[in-house]
Amino acid sequence: MVRITCTISFSTDDESVRGSRKDSFDDHYKRVVWSKDGDHGRYKEDPDELEACDGVEDEEVPDISLPTFFDGCSVHGANHIFAEDKKFSVRQGLWAVVFLMAVSMFLVQVLDRVIYYLQYDHVTMLDERNAKNITYPAITLCNYNMIRRSQLSYSDLLFMGPLLGGNASLWSPLSRVLDFNHFLPPPRESQPSTRQLLDRLGHQLEEMLLYCRFQGQMCGPRNFSTIFTRYGKCYTFNSGLDGRDLLITMKGGMGNGLELMLDIQQDEYLPVWGETDETSFEAGIKVQLHTQDEPPFIDQLGFGVAPGFQTFVSCQEQRLTFLPPPWGDCKSSAMDSDFFSTYSITACRIDCETRYLVENCNCRMVHMPGDAPYCTPEQYKECADPALDFLVERDNTFCVCDTPCNTTRYSKELSFVKIPSKASAKYLAKKYNKTEQYIADNILVLDIFFEALNYETIEQKAAYELAGLLGDIGGQMGLFIGASILTILELFDYLYEVIKFKLCRCTNKKQRANNNERGAVLSLDDVKHHAPCDNLRTPSTYPGNMLPHHPGQGNFEDFTC
């Protein structure tokens, strides 16, 4: 079998002729896929190979001129600026100036709206809503005095002395007053913990509580739970910790809440020998209203109630909703704590203070959770109290807690009346077997109730959201240039067509230049298969000097027929 190949060279001298008269061999040549060495090629059989760039030559070339685009575009005014086959006139210039001014004003407005959006401002919405019933808050009570004098033994005094601010020179007179009979303290290893001492020496609710009523029903110490704070042993009403259901109130006003009569037992107050963080110069009780999920932080968030007065506390529930970053600074994630499951500022503070004391003092205070040993009175004075003082310093960044995104608090309005009256002093003194002076110095009445059966919502909302930004941009776009989101799609579609046309034309030019430089190598079978004799006998459009010339015959007759 004899295989004959021929080398055909094409020149670019007859571009005008070749453009107007394309024969079948020219069409065949354009569909050759060349090898890397340029010595041989294969014919493009797959139509998908020809779709991308051949369509640019074979099909009608799309009109991608600006006048054509703006004539059909929905942008107002642009079609008056660009016109085909016309010189740039004064009218077009005026339209161009007006159009550029409109676009500039549109861009200025868009920039202003984007800057305002990036400021992430928020507004606060205030609303008041009615409710059929409201959960009654937890109420924590603490006596300002931490230790009862009558329960203090000489060994207790020696152990608790640093906590009370005393020293050895002051204990001797007190020992004579209390008649300890030269009692020797037990060894240190047998001494109870600070918490056990405060539990025994603190004021007992059974002795302080003279009267208790909730919504007309009698209550007592069994309705309170014991809890420890910076004031020592305290008590919480409606804590939810004892397994009981939370109390609810279905009416507002006086008589529909908690009413207490308490004896603060001032005769049990210890003398003040020196100042410590646990020293108190006040007489009365400290009260805090809080939710059941929030631990009390009564030393900083409570309010005082004085003896000799009946205190009315009218409260209203407030439900607050804050925004997370970037609009606000609230904490929306769950609390990472071994002690508390629900995040709150007080829980965060107590958790942080506990970790700080355990790390620096190797102990914890009586009100702190965990399993670390309780601080001794010496550790209170030398390490724990100074450490907490450091944490609350003005510029200290330790234990700075974020606001929770959802929280509940209680607004309060306090009013007072004097108790007892002259008419009731003798009756109360006889009833409780006390003197009238004792009643005036020690008895107080506390009445806590909801003002009305409603609650207040305070909610932060983003002042300018993404939907508002897009709406403003769309409105400004329609006002100044009469465009919309579909106009932007038209622009992208036009850019796509332009880029596609330019790339395909550039690719075709490079292919033609390479082909003209090295020629095409085809087998005779390829020529016979793709360029039949009857087609090749037609007059060729290529110069005769490129192949053996035979007058009266086509340039390829000698090779193919």
Image (spheres, grey):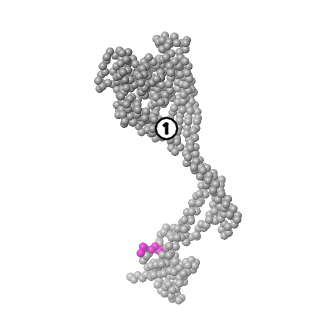
Q: Is residue 90 left or right of residue 296?
A: right
10 Å neighbourhood of mark 1: few (<14), some, or many (≥20)?
many
Q: Residue furthest front?
A: 169
Is residue 231 rendered magenta in the image? Answer: no
Q: Is residue 555 above or below residue 488?
A: below
Say which residue appears at 58% left-offset and 62% top-offset: 494
Q: Is residue 447 above or below residue 523?
A: above
From the viewer's side, name the closer residue of 240 and 91. Answer: 91
**Numbered label tally:** 1
Say which residue appears at 35% left-offset and 18% top-offset: 172
- Image quarter for residue 252? top right
Range covered by the magenta-colored residues: 30-37
x%, y% of residue 348?
44, 36
x%, y% of residue 17?
57, 80
Say which residue appears at 53% left-offset and 43% top-offset: 327
**Pointer 1 residue:** 403
Is residue 31 rendered magenta in the image? Answer: yes
Q: Is residue 481 visible?
A: no
